Image (cartoon, helix red, strand yellow):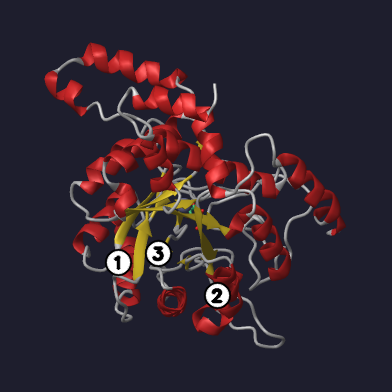
Amino acid sequence: MNYSEAKKRYAALGIDTDAAMNRLKDVPVSLHCWQGDDVRGFDTDPNKPLTGGIQTTGNYPGRARTPEELMADLEKVLSLIPGKAKMNLHASYAIFEEGQWADRDKLEPKHFAKWVEFCKKHNCGCDFNPTFFSHEKCDPLTLSSANEETRKFWVEHGKACVRISNYLAEELGQPCVMNIWTGDGFKDVPADRMGPRMRYKQSLDEILSEPYDFRKVKPCVESKVFGIGVEAYTVGSAEFTLSYAAQNADKCLPLMDNGHYHPTEVVYDKIPALLTFFPEIALHVTRAIRWDSDHVVLFDDDTKEMAKEIVRCGGLDGRVNLALDYFDASINRIAAWTVGFRNFQKALLYALLTPDFTDLQNKGDFTALLVLQEELKTLPFGEVWDEYCRLCGAPLDGMWLDDVRKYEKEVLEARR
Ligand code: RNT
Ligand code: ZN
């Protein structure tokens, strides 16, 4: 089997493989900078604990410790992936000139100038995230804190991030998706569940009162069910963030992370549910094992089904903002980034190669629907994937791991 034979097999089902590849190659998918340094950032002591209920586990050698190292690693990843990457930064990745450190409420666009340079060099846009965790002003709450001074500090951080997102969008000529996620919540049964939510709502209103053009800066609110050490109560629950986004649909989007729901809930089913009401939504693609463990994204059924819904619901036409969100510190971080990005590309390509069986469903021919859906699984997808990698000038499967090993020997091992 080669590509031209595979192309015929798909053509027999009415699928144009060339069109699918050409469609996918320009769809931006955000590459999260935080896989490279275990979510530590540069603006505070990198050895402080990661808070907010998220956790990286493992101590594989060679994590990036400086902006230069992180950019070098990202560059390596960019050379190994097909498709169109967009950068995704957290505010904690601000880059300060000697003696110019600023706290999170005082961050400015200039602290991201080096990242803009990096994105321009690689011809990519940039998404952004305020960092409401791993900081001494988490009490542990941030935007929902009962301490007015603390709450204000974090609101100012959010506003600063709107200005930075605007700068990124202007400089790079692409919209900047700015995701608001806080780990605010409690380990044990709270006395007051409503108060923190009322304050979170007020804080969001205050942050979004900072002027911005919603076509350029796209604030999102990400929900969560629970986190480590925050097991009993999460302020930004699913109902809370979804209601907020629905009530403020002219200025923010809902963001769903597929690690943030109860284990039998599936985000792929929520995609069309939200798109019925929201013109635009955002996703964090991750893999949860038993909890929001943020394992590397696989080419698995969950990811494939998400990609299918994104494609089927017109998500690639700007209705669904796509971002990866995982962090594994137990394996080579470059390989983790690369394989996860490639897997999501595979899932999207696979979805674009899936015939539209809506007619069978509407006719009630569930027998044919089941049979045909199953038979798709053994089509020569690998040939089309290889061709897509060639089209994008990216290495084929089997051809990049040695390169990562070489980089590990030459660059990562020197980081001791
Ligand atoms: C945490 C959320 C959030 C973070 C990143 C670092 O559970 O998924 O999106 O992973 O902002
Ligand atoms: Zn997330």
**Furthest-left residue in view?**
363
Q: Position of residue 186 (x, y in %)?
A: 46, 54
Q: CA distance from mark 2 to mark 3?
A: 15 Å
Ligand 1 near label 3 (Cβ, under 8 Å)? no
Q: Earlier in the sequence, mark 1 or mark 2?
A: 2
Q: Residue at x 26, y 68 (%)?
A: 251
Q: Is residue 125 above or below residue 386?
A: below
How far apart are labels 1 and 2 at the CA level? Answer: 31 Å
Measured Cα–Cα span from mark 1 to mark 3:
20 Å
Q: Position of residue 255 (x, y in %)?
A: 36, 54
| 169 lies left or right of 309 | right
Question: Mark 2: which amino acid?
Answer: Val
In the image, which disc is placed on residue 177? 3
Say which mark, if any, is on residue 201: 1
Q: Nearer the viewer, mark 1 or mark 3?
A: 3
Which residue is under mark 2?
116
